[in-house]
Amino acid sequence: MEFLVLSSRSQPERERIVMSAVVEAAEALGARRIMKRRARIEGTSVYVKDGEERVLVYRDWLRNWDWKRIYDRIIASTHTSPISRPKHRTIDSFVSEVRMDVG
């Protein structure tokens, strides 16, 4: 798991606050890395990336939240995102395992 942060040049103070929350969340979740990129956007956006899958977990659009509230939102969003859910086994893989146990 890694974090991708897209930030705007127009709000450096908000970017610092969001980045503080992202660093804390990354440590708590054991993320491998944090990537930060500049983009032409209105508010800083935070994505969780696992392989090719990327999920938006926070967007700092018209919000004036402190780092703790942002951190809480990121943690809650990662627990409910498709990335954090366990991958379900297919019926074919289950049948193969049963055949191996029986055979």
Image: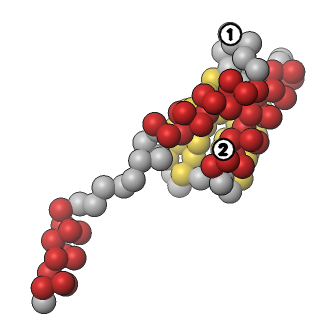
Residue occupying the point 23% across, 69% down: 93
Residue 68's spot in the image, x, y percent? 73, 27
Looking at the image, is 19 positioned above or below residue 27? above
* Residue bearing the label numbered 2: 3
Left or right of residue 40: residue 17: right
Q: Which mark is residue 62?
A: 1
Which residue is found at the position 74% from the left and 34% from the top?
21
Quadrant assignment, res 3: top right
Q: Is residue 75 above or below residue 11?
A: below
Q: In the displayed structure, would residue 95 be above or below residue 102?
A: above
Residue type, label 1: Leu
User: Can residue 69 be seen?
Assistant: yes
| Res 5 quadrant in image | top right
In terms of sequence position, does the residue under pointer 1 or pointer 2 come before the other? 2
Viewed as shown, does residue 88 lie left or right of 59?
A: left
Does residue 6 show up? no
What's under tag 2, amino acid-wise? Phe
Question: What secondary structure is found at the residue carrying circle 1?
Answer: loop
Tag 2: Cα neighbours inside 10 Å, few (<14), some, or many (≥20)?
Answer: many
* Image coordinates for residue 98, horizontal then vertical, percent: 16, 77
Please state if 34 lies on the left or on the right of 74 as rendered: right
Q: Residue at x 41, y 47 (%)?
A: 85
Characterize the local packing of mark 1: few (<14), some (14-19) or many (20 or more) Cα atoms within 10 angstroms: few
| Residue found at x 66% / y 52% | 31
Whole-angstrom CA distance, mark 1 to mark 2, is: 22 Å
